[in-house]
Amino acid sequence: MDTSKFFSLEGRVALITGGSRGIGKMIAAGYIAQGAKVYISSRKAPACEETAAELGPNCIPIPMDVSTVDGCKALAAKMAEHEDHLDILVNNAGAAWGVPFEEFPEAGWDKVMDLNVKSPFFLTQALHGMLKAQASYDKPSKVINITSIDGLRLNPWETYSYHASKSALIYLTKRMAARLIKDAIICTSLAPGAFASEMNRAARDHGDEVAKGIPMRRIGTDEDMAGAAIFLASRASDYVVGDTLVVDGGLVNAQVGTSIDA
């Protein structure tokens, strides 16, 4: 058995939404280092182009707002102008909304559910043809939905729609996996914990304090995220279907709860 190329992405074509910063950028850098050609998309064109310039010639920017079905279709059409197939799709674009229960608005539901749940589905649907174009059971295509540990446990903040959206996406991953496996497309989910990003400003701005509550005693690094995402995209995970990989330093699965005496 030769395992030397288990994690290689040489010759693979990837698309990462929300790829201009944070977790998306970490994943993009990791894929490029493993030999992939990576297209990154984000709503803000300057940020998308700046990141692509930073990551080098194997990173191509395709700015697009995927918060609507039309936006998802437009991104798929742009991809088809560049490539005849797609090996890896990372549905990473997302939004959060935190407001007290008494004040939580309808807009906070619509924006978050549209981008976090509907968009991964409709973008995958729009790219279905490209994903299955060269897929086989010996070399499957991959769809990786970026969920969150907040879909598995509560955080301290009143992020009602975010919690609901990430829980929904974890289960949607299973449903999508059951259908897409027929076309040799593997769908999985990656659930990050505390990584420094615009969405997780607590980890970004107060990392040392946040780390005190994590069993590993640190927040996640770029390498932690890249490693997990490379695993799910590579040959190493070709028999992992529909599951959620938790990357959180032990918060979900190795955190001892507080007991309450009667």
Image (cartoon, rainbow, N blue to C red):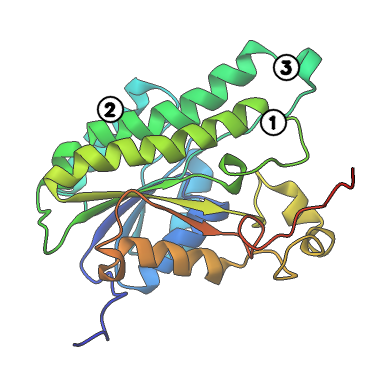
Crowd tier of the residue under label 3, counting other residues whose Cα lies within 10 Å: few below 14, some 14–19, many 20 or above: some
For image coordinates 51% across by 24% down, the residue present is: 113
Q: Residue 108: x and y, percent?
A: 63, 20
Q: CA distance from mark 2 to mark 1?
A: 29 Å
Q: Are marks 1 and 3 in contact (CB under 8 Å)?
A: no
For image coordinates 34% across by 31% down, the residue present is: 121
Where is 112 relative to 40, above or below? above
Q: Nearer the viewer, residue 3 or 208?
A: 3
Which image quadrant: the N terminus? bottom left
Q: Nearer the viewer, residue 70 or 3?
A: 3
> Which amino acid does the dot numbered 2 rest on?
Lys
Q: Residue 164: x and y, percent?
A: 57, 29
Secondary structure of the residue carrying tag 2 is: helix
Specify whether 35 is left or right of 210. left
Secondary structure of the residue carrying tag 1 is: loop
Specify whether 230 is left or right of 125. right
For image coordinates 33% across by 57% down, the residue present is: 38
For image coordinates 36% across by 61% down, the residue present is: 232
Q: Residue tagged by mark 1?
A: 159
Q: CA distance from mark 1 to mark 3?
A: 9 Å
Dot placed on the residue nearer the N-terminal end, 2 or 1 = 2
Q: Nearer the viewer, residue 242 or 262?
A: 262
Q: Residue tagged by mark 2?
A: 73
Q: Quadrant of residue 162?
A: top right
Crowd tier of the residue under label 2, counting other residues whose Cα lies within 10 Å: few below 14, some 14–19, many 20 or above: some
Where is 131 relative to 236, above or below? above
Dot placed on the residue nearer the N-terminal end, 2 or 3 = 2
Crowd tier of the residue under label 1, counting other residues whose Cα lies within 10 Å: few below 14, some 14–19, many 20 or above: many
Tell me, for residue 104, which label it has, or none: 3
Q: CA distance from mark 2 to mark 3?
A: 31 Å
Any part of residue 43 in sight: yes
